Every structure is written in structure tokens, then in C-alpha cells.
Image (spheres, rainbow, N blue to C red):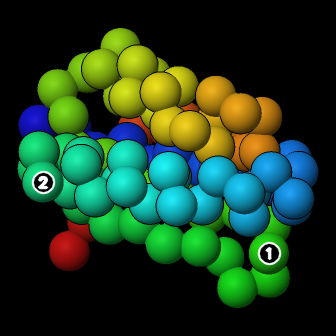
Amino acid sequence: MKYFAVFLPMLDQKKSQKYRPQHLEYLSEKTREGKIFANGRFTDGTGGLIIYKVDSIEEVEKIAKQDPYVIQGARGVEIHEWEMSN
């Protein structure tokens, strides 16, 4: 498994509020599937961060692009492989 940090920068506050329930349900689904290590919003309103644990960049790209926030244009998406150090 690899870890990928997915930054979801705010693009449209109104759309973000409108599609929040669908986004949260999508995250719940991915959590149940064991694909999310951590997630949360930035307190300054600039977006949020999800750390996925999946096998490949292709898999995380597919997952991130299916997020309702991204589909609806509420948030952008920026993906980086993340190496956790203890």
C-alpha cells in the first residue's frame, strides 16, 4: 500500500456547501472500503485534505476524480504521494 495526500482546494463555496452531504457520503464509503487513512477540512476555509491508502497513483486519481466535490466543480484536486515517517 502507498499513501497519497489529496488536497481539495476551494473553488466555489456555494457548490461546496450544496454538495457537502454527497462528499461526506463518498468519504464514508471509501473509509468502509479501507481506502482512507485520514481526512479533514482546513479551518481557514481554503479546502481540505484526504490521505488515501491505495496501491497506485492511477487508483487514487480515479477515486479523487469521482468525489462529488470534484465532479461538481466545488473543489479542485491536487495529488501527491506521501511517505509517513515516525
Q: Residue at x 49, y 72 (%)?
A: 40
Along the line of sight, the residue nearer the viewer: 57 or 63: 63
Find numbered disc 1 in the image and state the secondary structure of the residue it sits on: loop
Which element is circle 2 on? Answer: helix
Residue type, mark 2 in image? Arg
Q: Residue at x 53, y 25 (%)?
A: 65
Which quarter of the rendered picture does the C terminus lie within?
A: bottom left
| Nearest the eye: 28 or 43 | 28
Q: Residues within 10 Å of mark 2 (few under 14, many from 20)?
A: few
Q: CA distance from mark 1 to mark 2?
A: 26 Å
- Name the residue rendered at 50%, 51% in the picture: 22
User: What's the residue type where badge 1 is placed?
Assistant: Gly
Residue 46 place in picture, x, y as percent: 80, 67
Residue behind mark 2: 32
Question: In the rendering, at what x and y percent does residue 60 appear?
Answer: 36, 28
Mark seen at residue 31: none
Q: Which mark is residue 45?
A: 1
Residue 66: x and y in percent read 47, 27
Q: Tell me if 50 is positioned left or right of 69 in this view.
A: left
Mark 1 crowd level (few <14, some 14–19, many ≥20, 10 Å Cα):
few
Q: Quadrant of residue 68?
A: top right
Q: Position of residue 83 (x, y in %)?
A: 31, 51
